Amino acid sequence: MFTARAGQHARAGLRTVVELVRAVVDVALGVAARMVRFVEAWLLDAKRARYGLAVTRILLAATAIGLLLTNFRTRYYAFGSGSAWNGEAAQPLSDFPGIWIFSLFHRIALNDAALTAAYLALLVLAVLVLLGWRTKLVLPVFFVGWVSFIEMNDSLGDQGDNMFRIVLLGLLLADTSSRWSLDARRRAAAGPIAGRWLQRKWRGEPIAPEWTTNLAHNLVLVAVTCHVCFVYASGALYKAGGAPWQQGYAIYNPLSTERFGTWPELTTLLTTAAPMVTVVSWSSIIIQMCFPMMLLMRGTRIIGLLGILSFHIGIAVLMGLPWFSLSMIAIDAIFIRDVTWNHMATTVRDTWRRARTETIPPAPEPSNLPERELTHA
């Protein structure tokens, strides 16, 4: 009898364990199914961060315009015949099978007139990208020209150039002109039409099923997000491994040099207080390390974006690297919600309209004027 009861208890326990495992598996499968549906809906239902990617397009183009304009007077020395010493014009490093197209500037570097013409053409392309005119056709041409231009003199570049190229390559597959562009205005004014492939492509309209363009657009967004997070996290880890950053005096060294100490008075004011130097050095590591995790919640995302914005503004002002900072700020714009961008745009637009429509108070009627003024009249 004891053995029979023990066997019943064992079987009952086994059934309980099986039911518990089944319940856990059902819950796990339900969670997995909900996650799959969420990911599928997020990737395929609509294009995400359209305002953010539009701002990225605008600010990257502004960065290119700024670089081209500020280097125009020294273009021959930096990228033309005067830069022949770097060897790029004689044997382009990017001129190997498959990437010969990125050697456009290398082939005309020693011809000053041709270089100036290509330089100005690239500037025009940057303006068109900023305005969002025929973006689907202009952006690939600009990408090829920009990479060729940047490759002319690696010694003048920085890490912002690498991020610029990587993100610009991704933008080729995203819809960056659906907001704040001439393309968007033209589409809204003309409405959708059914035409030939080339005609629709010229108009900037989608020529593939909507779910495919949504998928490409959103995957670009995911790829850029991952890359930015990797850059910030790896940069923080690299800094944390160095003694200057661990001891809190890392920013003092570059700011004390002639190349990066562009504002001596401001640099002296900042570096005079040792605690301030330590706070800035350590906070840059902390904000970069925590940035990927801070994106997960709206409250921490706002703090992270404000922190990284101040970080890049500090680099632009104190170290004289405005175009590097602007390119990174442009990329970080994708983390601001479309609702926020739309609200900011509406606020600015309404403020501008009120300022323009504000009327001057009407002049008083003649009968209300003082008697002296009536007599004078």
Image: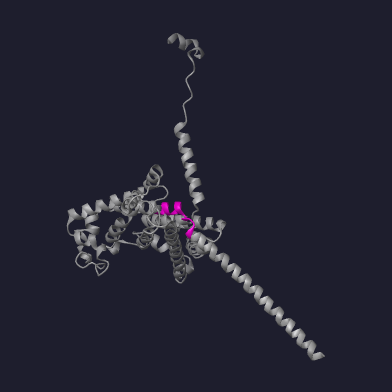
Magenta stretch, overall SS? helix
Colour mode of the rendering: one colour
* Image x and y of residue 109, in percent: 20, 59
Tell me which corner region of the image, top left, top right, bottom left or bottom right, holds residue 230: bottom left
- How many marks overall? 0
Residue 129 left/right relative to 292: left
Pick the residue in front: 265 or 42.
42
Residue 52 is covered by the magenta coloring: yes
Tell me what residue is drawn at x 57 percent, y 67 percent: 33
The N terminus: image quadrant: bottom right
Tell me which corner region of the image, top left, top right, bottom left or bottom right, holds residue 110: bottom left
Pick the residue in front: 323 or 144.
144
Residue 284 left/right relative to 96: right
Tell me which corner region of the image, top left, top right, bottom left or bottom right, holds residue 221: bottom left
Q: Which residues are magenta?
A: 44-56
Q: Residue furthest top?
A: 375
Pick the residue in front: 186 or 119.
186
Asked if one can make out residue 91 in the rendered structure from this viewpoint, the answer is yes
Tell me what residue is drawn at x 76 percent, y 84 percent: 9
* Image x and y of residue 23, in percent: 66, 73
The C terminus: image quadrant: top left
* Image x and y of residue 50, in percent: 45, 53
Tell me what residue is drawn at x 53 percent, y 58 percent: 301
Asked if one can make out residue 73 in the rendered structure from this viewpoint, the answer is no
Residue 281 left/right relative to 258: right
* Image x and y of residue 187, in percent: 39, 46
Residue 119 is covered by the magenta coloring: no
